[in-house]
Image (tube, grey):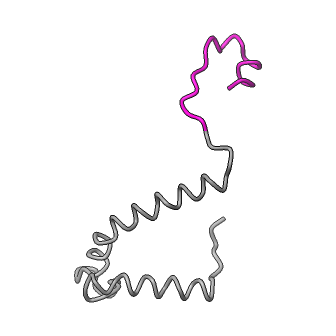
Amino acid sequence: AAVYAQLHPERTARVVLDSSGDPDPARVERGWLANMARGAEDRFPDFAAWAADPARGAERLAERPAQVRTRVLALAAQLDAHPRATTTP
């Protein structure tokens, strides 16, 4: 904001900073992951019900929602042991 104001003083009478970021990227990442984990845990029963829905046919992950967590954790362990390359940048 300060650089923009210096470069374009005719366009900048006032600047409002809406928020500030934590300068420690490791702390930001840990907080983001903690919040993400909480949200994933809260919503996992909905995902498990969807993933086990018979309407999903051959794409469903398990026959019952209670089996989905075991299947997802097994997949995560497999990917930890043998990571796959990604085509996404």
Q: Quick check: 83 above or below 41?
A: below
- Residue 7 locus on image (x, y percent): 76, 20
User: Seen in the image, is 20 located left or right of residue 2?
Assistant: left
The foreground one among 88 and 37 is 37
Rendered residue at 57%/22% (across/down)? 16
Q: Quadrant of the C terminus?
A: bottom right
Rendered residue at 58%/59% (across/down)? 30
Q: Quick check: 43 above or below 65?
A: above
User: Seen in the image, is 29 located left or right of residue 59?
Assistant: right
The foreground one among 9 and 36 is 36
Q: Quick check: 17 above or below 77?
A: above
Q: Give, as a single range, the part of the protein colored magenta.
A: 1-20
User: Seen in the image, is 69 located left or right of residue 52?
Assistant: right
Dividing the picture into quadrants, the one containing residue 88 is bottom right
- Residue 60 locus on image (x, y percent): 32, 83
Rendered residue at 53%/86% (across/down)? 77
- Residue 19 locus on image (x, y percent): 55, 33
Residue 52 counted in the magenta span: no
- Residue 51 locus on image (x, y percent): 32, 78
The foreground one among 80 and 26 is 26
Rendered residue at 61%/40% (across/down)? 21
Q: Quadrant of the N terminus?
A: top right
Q: Tell me how many marks there are.
A: 0
Dividing the picture into quadrants, the one containing residue 73 is bottom left
Outermost residue, left direction?
Answer: 54
